[in-house]
């Protein structure tokens, strides 16, 4: 009987260590999403049309007025571009957060199930030491 309680006490530190590791994962730049690794240096590319700045050539009043019109058109297109990249960034962040959260939940559940399985094996093997 004394051995059984000793073995049970040995399982508890292992479970505590696993729980600790799950609660405080190692600090790193991150995992991977799809085929690429995530890091603060990952490059994000929006799928938005980015307008080219107009070439300004002013030589008289007419060309100046035309340049002002081109500039105003460019400002309008730049505003549309900024709205587009903001919307895409928000959507991509939401999608990435969901994918990472789902992946975390899956990996967490997987390791907890494995810990419980090994714990169950150990507990069912206790009869060997009694």
Image (cartoon, rainbow, N blue to C red):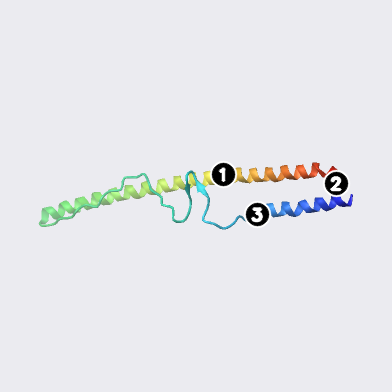
Q: Earlier in the sequence, mark 2 or mark 3?
A: 3
Distance, label 3 to label 1, CA atoms, is 17 Å
Q: Count neighbours of disc 2 (C-alpha within 10 A) and say few if under 14, some if 14 to 19, many if 20 or more.
A: few
The one of 74 and 13 positioned closer to us in this rendering: 13
Tag count: 3
Name the disc covering residue 94, or none.
none
Distance, label 2 to label 3, CA atoms, is 30 Å
- Is residue 50 found left or right of 30 in the rendered image? left
Please tell me whether residue 26 is drawn above or below residue 91 in the rendered image.
Answer: below
Q: Residue at x 36, y 48 (%)?
A: 83
Residue 55: x, y in percent? 19, 53
The one of 17 and 127 positioned closer to us in this rendering: 127
Q: Which residue is mark 1?
A: 103
Residue 57: x, y in percent? 15, 55
- Is residue 51 found left or right of 100 in the rendered image? left
Q: Which residue ends up furthest to the left in the rendered image?
A: 60
The one of 75 and 10 positioned closer to us in this rendering: 10
- Tag nearer the camera, 1 or 2: 2
Q: Contact (CB < 8 A) between labels 3 and 1? A: no
Q: Which residue ends up furthest to the front in the rendered image?
A: 128
Distance, label 1 to label 2, CA atoms, is 40 Å
Q: Which residue ends up furthest to the right in the rendered image?
A: 1
Q: Count neighbours of disc 1 (C-alpha within 10 A) and say few if under 14, some if 14 to 19, many if 20 or more.
A: few
Q: Residue at x 33, y 48 (%)?
A: 81
Q: Earlier in the sequence, mark 1 or mark 2?
A: 1
Q: Which residue is mark 2?
A: 129
Label 1 secondary element: helix
Name the disc covering residue 21, or none.
3
């Amino acid at each position: 009987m004394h051995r059984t309680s000793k073995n049970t006490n040995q399982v508890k530190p292992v479970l505590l260590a696993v729980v600790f590791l799950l609660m405080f994962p190692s600090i790193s730049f991150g995992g991977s999403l799809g085929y690429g690794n995530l890091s603060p240096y990952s490059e994000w590319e929006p799928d938005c049309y980015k307008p080219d700045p107009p070439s300004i050539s002013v030589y008289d009043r007419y060309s100046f007025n035309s340049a002002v019109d081109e500039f105003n058109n460019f400002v309008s297109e730049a505003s549309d571009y900024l709205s587009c990249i903001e919307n895409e960034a928000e959507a991509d962040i939401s999608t990435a957060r969901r994918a990472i959260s789902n992946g975390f939940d899956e990996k967490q559940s997987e390791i907890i199930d494995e810990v419980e399985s090994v714990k169950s094996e150990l507990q069912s093997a206790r009869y060997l030491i009694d």
